[in-house]
């Protein structure tokens, strides 16, 4: 995804010393992964895996504007059950599925207003209905069938318990696929408390199934903004339980802990973050000198960027639009705002079904790529009166403004595939002269005084998370990367990682990819000694330098 305007630019060049260290790491780690029949030893992982900082120390202090961050405001109870639910910038660029047997409308009472107990007698959770656990268990079992690599990692490392003593607090989408990750972490020795990073993406039955097994889950589909922050607080603030690891998606959990519980935050051993938004927040903290724990940037790993963002969105954009609108794609005039990895995936899918796709871009490189791929690059104002569908995926704010929405034709569809609800100016539509009409779950008609209707999906939040599903296999890739990053940070010797943001080394990306190749019965060609010497490579990888862009 192209960088939003004003975001902190990441340093691309690695110091020669860092590159040399990365090569040494690759040599050590390759001993574990070279042989097809070799087994990965989790005890060796920590000594072999050393990630590389993504930027050099910055001498100039960058002001971290704390008072403008949404996470610094704890909402009042007056906001509960509000239709607006103008939530914070919680991440929605990554993964999960919003499909659920149950809907939040089935029972209007808030889970916070009732006490539930699982079969073990524990009430340390808050979900929609604990009685849905059996349905959730079936969903998790189905997901496991297409997450064979993560299950393989679980089986290999389960006896060694590399996460024994780890107390992980997580804030991600709570779905069947995430549940497989959570249960893998538990099988590897961790204790977990979990909450949702998106108010619409939680599968209620899966949350119930996790709570039934003893994982403290605080999440349900259709939370209000007040509920959202309350759930995060309940995960962090539990008497007698001190978290030492964070798995975050969007940065809300990290910053809530940083603002509200600084003493708890200082005792964290590592943060794993997988979203554009969350990584940007971590860089803000780091450059302001306020990041007091090491963090792993999973978002910019190859296995996340290329597979989760590109291939996942290529399939899920169609699913989300079809489920919500039954729209015919052939011949429709569509504008995709942003031609990053998410935008590329969306455009490829829409073009294949006959849509006439145009692109908006701020980056000349991404714009040139769009032109070479056969798309017209335009300014949104140039086509706003003719467009049938607008899809935002920039990571920016106010990409579609009220003025542009006023000029759209009747029946136009507006939706978001970016990381949060800031891309479409939804707040400007909540005015007395406009009427909101809910026609389906997550589908609103916004009606103008002259009778014009604009179809808004998921109230401007991520379409595939809120309205459809995403491929389980792709989520296995991301989840495996997250699990390995947690293992590494937790087991790393003191001093290996400083108070900085790190990237996964190329060798780890290659290892995650290799675990998933067996699904396709793929057979890698092996370099001969002569070929490896000619290319200057280790026969077992890494096969590309850190600066290589796939």
Image (cartoon, rainbow, N blue to C red):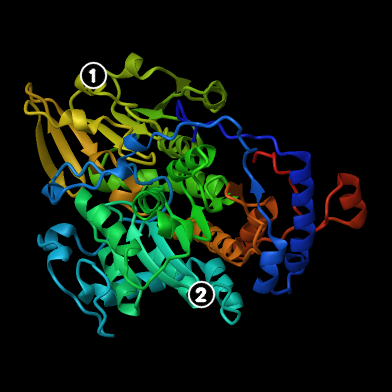
Q: Residue at x 45, y 41 (%)?
A: 281
Apparent side of residue 519 relative to residue 383 in the rendered image (left or right): right
Q: In terms of image quadrants, where is residue 422?
A: top left
In the displayed image of the protein, which residue is found farthest to the bottom?
Answer: 120
Q: Residue at x 19, y 43 (%)?
A: 443
Mark 1: which secondary structure?
A: helix
Residue 466's disc number? none
State the image coordinates of residue 369 (x, y, percent, origin top left).
56, 27
**Label 2 Cα neighbours within 10 Å, binned few <14 / some 14-19 / many ≥20:** few
Q: In terms of image quadrants, where is residue 477?
A: bottom right
- Eye-nearest disc, 2 or 1: 2
Q: Nearer the viewer, residue 271 or 99?
A: 271
State the image coordinates of residue 175 (x, y, percent, origin top left).
35, 62
Q: Is residue 111 visible?
A: yes
- First along the sequence among labels 2 and 1: 2
Residue beneath disc 1: 403
Apparent side of residue 387 relative to residue 535 in the rendered image (left or right): left
Q: Residue at x 61, y 63 (%)?
A: 488
Q: Nearer the viewer, residue 40 or 151?
A: 40
In the displayed image of the protein, which residue is found farthest to the front?
Answer: 263
Q: Nearer the viewer, residue 445 or 74?
A: 74
Residue beneath disc 2: 165
Quadrant housing the C terminus: top right
Apparent side of residue 369 relative to residue 19 in the rendered image (left or right): left
State the image coordinates of residue 139 (x, y, percent, origin top left).
35, 70
**What is the CA distance from the residue labelled 2 to the residue labelled 1?**
54 Å
Considering only vertical position in the picture, is 330 above or below 44? above
**Label 1 Cα neighbours within 10 Å, binned few <14 / some 14-19 / many ≥20:** few
Q: Is residue 223 visible?
A: no
């Amino acid at each position: 995804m192209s960088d939003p305007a004003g975001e902190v630019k990441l340093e691309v060049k690695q110091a020669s010393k860092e590159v040399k260290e990365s090569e040494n790491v690759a040599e050590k780690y390759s001993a574990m992964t070279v042989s097809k029949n070799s087994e990965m030893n989790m005890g060796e992982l920590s000594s072999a895996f050393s990630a590389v900082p993504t930027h050099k120390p910055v001498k100039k202090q960058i002001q971290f504007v704390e008072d403008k961050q949404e996470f610094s405001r704890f909402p009042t109870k007056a906001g509960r059950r509000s239709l607006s639910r103008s939530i914070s910038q919680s991440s929605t660029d990554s993964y999960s599925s919003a499909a659920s047997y149950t809907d939040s409308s089935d029972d209007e009472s808030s889970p916070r207003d009732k006490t539930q107990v699982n079969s073990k007698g524990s009430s340390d959770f808050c979900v929609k209905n604990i009685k849905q656990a059996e349905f959730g268990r079936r969903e998790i079992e189905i997901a496991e069938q297409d997450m064979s690599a993560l299950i393989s990692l679980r089986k290999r490392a389960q006896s060694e318990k590399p996460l024994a003593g780890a107390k992980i607090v997580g804030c991600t989408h709570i779905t069947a696929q995430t549940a497989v990750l959570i249960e893998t972490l538990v099988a590897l020795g961790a204790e977990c408390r979990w909450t949702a990073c998106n108010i619409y993406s939680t599968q209620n039955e899966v949350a119930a199934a996790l709570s039934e097994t003893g994982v403290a889950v605080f999440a349900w589909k259709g939370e209000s903004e007040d509920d959202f922050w309350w759930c995060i607080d309940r995960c962090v603030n539990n008497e007698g339980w001190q978290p030492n690891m964070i798995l975050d998606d969007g940065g809300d959990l990290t910053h809530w802990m940083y603002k509200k519980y600084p003493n708890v935050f200082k005792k964290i051993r590592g943060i794993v973050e997988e979203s554009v938004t969350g990584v940007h927040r971590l860089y803000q903290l780091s450059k302001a000198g306020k990041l007091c724990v090491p963090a792993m940037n999973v978002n910019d790993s190859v296995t996340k960027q290329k597979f989760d963002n590109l291939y996942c969105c290529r399939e899920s954009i169609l699913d989300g639009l079809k489920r919500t609108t039954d729209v015919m794609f052939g011949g429709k005039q569509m504008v995709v705002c942003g031609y990053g990895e998410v935008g590329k995936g969306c455009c490829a899918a829409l073009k294949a079904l006959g849509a006439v796709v145009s692109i908006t871009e701020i980056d000349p490189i991404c714009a040139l790529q769009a032109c070479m791929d056969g798309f017209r690059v335009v300014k949104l104002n140039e086509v706003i009166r003719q467009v049938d569908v607008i899809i935002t995926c920039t990571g920016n704010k106010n990409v579609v403004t009220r003025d542009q929405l006023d000029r759209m034709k009747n029946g136009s569809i507006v939706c978001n595939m970016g990381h949060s609800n800031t891309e479409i100016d939804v707040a400007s539509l909540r005015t007395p002269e406009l009427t909101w009409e809910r026609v389906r779950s997550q589908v609103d008609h916004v009606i103008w005084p002259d009778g014009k209707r604009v179809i808004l999906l998921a109230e401007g939040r991520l379409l595939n998370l809120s309205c459809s599903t995403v491929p389980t296999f792709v989520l296995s890739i991301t989840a495996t990367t997250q699990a390995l990053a947690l293992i590494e940070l937790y087991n790393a010797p003191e001093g290996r990682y400083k108070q900085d943001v790190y990237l996964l080394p190329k060798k780890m990306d290659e290892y995650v990819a290799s675990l998933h190749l067996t699904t396709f019965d793929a057979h890698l060609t092996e370099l001969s000694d002569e070929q490896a010497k000619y290319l200057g490579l280790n026969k077992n990888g890494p096969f590309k330098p850190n600066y290589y862009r796939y």
